Amino acid sequence: MIKITEEQKKYLLEQSVDINDALQNNDLGALLLVIDDAIVDNIVDHKDEPDEIGINLQRIYDQVYNQNTED
């Protein structure tokens, strides 16, 4: 089971990040990929610099990665 907080899920869904399939399939790689895609889209849309949303998405990406790889 993927470790992700309700707060993280809520923020990702508010930013239209399509996380549902990855969560239903318990696929951490797919989840990180859709978050990464949203980060890249944000950077491209803002002249190669993330805005506050992009920074928050990166933070959540890092948190989810760490939550699921720490022993």
Image (cartoon, helix red, strand yellow):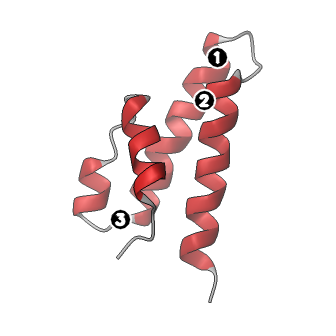
- Identified by mark 2, the residue type is Val
Residue 16 image point, x, y percent: 37, 29
Residue 17 image point, x, y percent: 39, 35
**Residue topped by disc 1:** 44
Q: Quadrant of residue 18?
A: top left
Q: Residue at x 26, y 49 (%)?
A: 20
- Identified by mark 3, the residue type is Asp
Q: CA distance from mark 2 to mark 1?
A: 6 Å
User: Which type of secondary structure does the marked residue at label 3 adopt?
Assistant: loop
Q: Residue at x 61, y 27 (%)?
A: 53
Q: Quadrant of residue 41?
A: top right
Instruction: Give 3 or 42, whichever is nearer the viewer.
Output: 3
Q: Residue at x 62, y 90 (%)?
A: 71
The numbered dot on residue 27 is: 3
Residue 24 image point, x, y percent: 22, 61
Residue 5 image point, x, y percent: 45, 61
How crowded pointer 1 is (Cα within 10 Å; few <14, some 14-19, many 20+) is rated as: few
User: Which type of secondary structure does the marked residue at label 1 adopt?
Assistant: helix
71 sits left or right of 6 in the view: right
Q: Quadrant of the N terminus?
A: bottom left
Q: CA distance from mark 3 to mark 2?
A: 20 Å
Q: CA distance from mark 1 to mark 3?
A: 26 Å
Dots 2 and 1: beta carbons under 8 Å?
Answer: yes
Disc on the earlier residue, 1 or 3: 3
Dots 1 and 3: beta carbons under 8 Å?
Answer: no
Dots 3 and 2: beta carbons under 8 Å?
Answer: no
User: Which type of secondary structure does the marked residue at label 2 adopt?
Assistant: helix
**Residue topped by disc 2:** 40
